[in-house]
Image (tube, grey):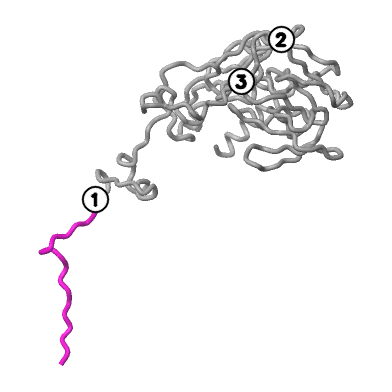
Amino acid sequence: MNVLGRNLLAKLCQQFKESFSVVERCAFHTTAAIKTQHTKGPYRYVPILIPVEEVGHNPLKGLKCHRTGGRGPDGRIWNHRRAGGKFDRKLRIVDNMRTDFGGETIVEKVIYIRYDPLRSAKIAAVAGGSRKRFIVATENMQPGDIITTSCDVKEESGVKLKEGDSRPLAVIPSNTMVHNIELQVGKGGIIARAAGSYARVSKQLLNECVLKMPSGKEIVVSNKCMASVGQVSNADHNTIDIGSPNKLRWLGIRPRSGFYVAPQDAQKNNKKNKFLRKKKSYLISQEPEQYVRFTY
């Protein structure tokens, strides 16, 4: 994206982002919340925001997610091997801002758990009071479970927490698996949101908390950052066997063979492009003559 496209998106952010609610802010950071309009200018498609009425009134409604084929607003390919697909995917807005917003503990009930076509983990629809939202489901979460959310840092550290409960890291006991972890206070969960991912609370410092990842690396964040208890659902996502290239086409992944690409790309990828790249071959009779040097 050149300077013109970046300036256009920056103006849209400044104009609309401040007036959005929590659910609408989640929708703004997704590609499906930005429609495209055909123009005749330097950009073939200009991004425009989805009207507020389509998002704010029914947060559980699936939004249309247009397939771009990996092309950006200028019509050029930005992401390779993105084409095809046998079914229409709709976006479900997942709220990663697990905060209480009023200083009181939020009690919510899990309505149902469903598959999300745009992410590897499953999502759960929860409702409490006058609000409904989607959250990332945990491994052992079932419909009918009651989950709580509280931002009280002074809460007793010995409170028993269930899967799906969200608390600051200062309250969560050590050696507990957590997911949907914030890096900055009030910015929403960023770490451990994919299928089967988690982190363990290693130890508590003065104003910080040490988290240990499954890879062995440790990260240090503020103990006021929110985190949800439990491991993300669909832990067997990486063990699923695709089986055939037709299934990849169904999922929207286009094959790219080394035999049918440009010769320079085939050489970079160490592919044997026998159809496009021709090697020079000499017969025995066509070998260049070797000069003989006589010495007397």
As for residue 63 lying within the magenta part, the answer is: no
Neighbourhood count class around disc 2 (C-alpha, 10 Å): few under 14, some 14–19, many 20 upward: some
User: Which residue, as the protein is rendered here, is positioned at the far right?
Assistant: 154
Q: List x then y, in percent, for residue 296.
A: 15, 93
Residue kind at label 2, given as amino acid type: Lys
**Mark 2, secondary structure of its residue:** strand
> In terms of sequence position, does the residue under pointer 1 or pointer 3 come before the other?
3
Magenta stretch bounds: 278-296
Q: Is residue 175 left or right of residue 136?
A: right
**Mark 3, secondary structure of its residue:** strand
Neighbourhood count class around disc 3 (C-alpha, 10 Å): few under 14, some 14–19, many 20 upward: some
User: Which residue, as the protein is rendered here, is positioned at the far left?
Assistant: 285
Q: Are marks 3 and 2 in contact (CB under 8 Å)?
A: no
Residue picked out by circle 1:
278
> In terms of sequence position, does the residue under pointer 3 or pointer 2 come before the other?
3
Q: Is residue 10 left or right of residue 245?
A: right
- Pick the front one: 21 or 41: 21
Q: List x then y, in percent, for residue 248.
A: 41, 26
Quadrant location of residue 165? top right
**Mark 1, secondary structure of its residue:** loop
As for residue 293 lying within the magenta part, the answer is: yes
Residue kind at label 1, given as amino acid type: Lys
In the image, which is nearer the foreground, mark 1 or mark 3? 1
Q: List x then y, in percent, for residue 216.
A: 65, 42
Residue kind at label 3, given as amino acid type: Leu
Residue picked out by circle 3:
49
Measure the alpha-carbon separation of dots 1 and 3.
Answer: 50 Å
Q: List x then y, in percent, for residue 120.
A: 55, 25
Residue picked out by circle 2:
109
Q: Are marks 2 and 1 in contact (CB under 8 Å)?
A: no
